[in-house]
Amino acid sequence: MPLVYCGACSHAPGITARAERADPAKRAALEAAFHRMGEEIRATRPDALVVIAAEHFANFFMNNMPAFAIGMADSYEGPIEDEAFLKIKRTTVPGNKALSRKLIEKVMQTVDVAYAEEWKFDHGISVPLHFLTPNYDLPIIPANINCQGPPLAPLARAWAFGEALRAAADSVPERIALIGTGGISHWPATPDSGKINAAWDQEFLRRWAANDRAALLSYSDAEIYRDGGQGGFEIRTFIAAAAAAKGAKGTVQFCEPLPIFAVSCTIARMQLAA
């Protein structure tokens, strides 16, 4: 069945960890946008939600850093971070091992992808789920792109991964929703943490909403690092989501630079054909 939902959102840990330090009006608007996204996802009646996130050395490290990975379990635990820090209670999140396996087998036809039967969710998945599926009643299929430890997969390979996920979703009878999560420009764990290149973020989102493949893939890692920081490498998750939209155009439903959260907090959706 064709993919029923495709979008992208931020996953910055500060969104929950430092929520009380944000401008109240902007925080309320962001959380409302998250909740609307959750409602839109549920309205498509998905059987599972694929969450494409970035690795933060929670499950993989430099002794084994796959470019792409997909979870294959009936349940997952998260967040891996300290609950008192992230302010999200650790819980068990449902998965769907059989469906994951079907998707993995299809993705493998075109993209080399690792799979993991054990997976600990970090803020990259737990923060979005906290807002999108607060009751944890929707099976999650985690997907991962290495956006942390160079050498990084070329942007064109992130696009190919998104295409492969779309082909996999279209090949099964289940209704699949998909989101990419990450930051745009940000400089985590550096003296520049909190810096945001809002103009660069807006230009990237313009290209994303237009689903302009050539423009999205034109960035070099040197340019990303210069203009978007090392956290900017996470645009790979947004690019994969754009590829999964199969040419559909998008709408940026919310984008606001919030330095206390260290990113331009973003909620966006691709307008898939009915």
Image (tube, helix red, strand yellow):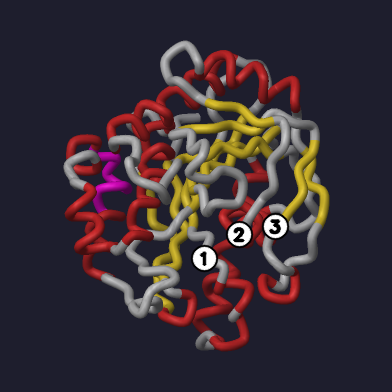
Tell me if residue 20 comes above or below residue 56 in the rendering: below
Q: Nearer the viewer, residue 155 or 205?
A: 155
Q: Amino acid at mark 3?
A: Ile
Residue 45 at x, y = what percent? 69, 36
Residue at figure coordinates x 36%, y 79% from the top left: 191
Residue of label 2: 123
Residue at figure coordinates x 23%, y 39% from the top left: 217
Residue 131's quadrant in the figure? bottom right
Queried whether the magenta region covers residue 123, the answer comes back as no
Residue of label 1: 12
> What secondary structure is found at the residue carrying circle 3?
loop
**Are the residues flagged by discs 2 and 1 in contact, CB closer than 8 Å?**
yes
Q: Earlier in the sequence, mark 1 or mark 3?
A: 1
Q: Earlier in the sequence, mark 3 or mark 2?
A: 3
Tell me if residue 270 comes above or below residue 126 in the rendering: above
Tell me if residue 137 comes above or below residue 258 in the rendering: above
Residue at figure coordinates x 54%, y 64% from the top left: 33
The span picked out in magenta is 206-212
Q: Amino acid at mark 1?
A: Ala
Residue of label 3: 80
Residue 82 at x, y = what percent? 72, 68
Residue 43's quadrant in the figure? top right
Q: Residues within 10 Å of mark 2 (few under 14, many from 20)?
A: many
Residue 99 at x, y = what percent? 70, 22
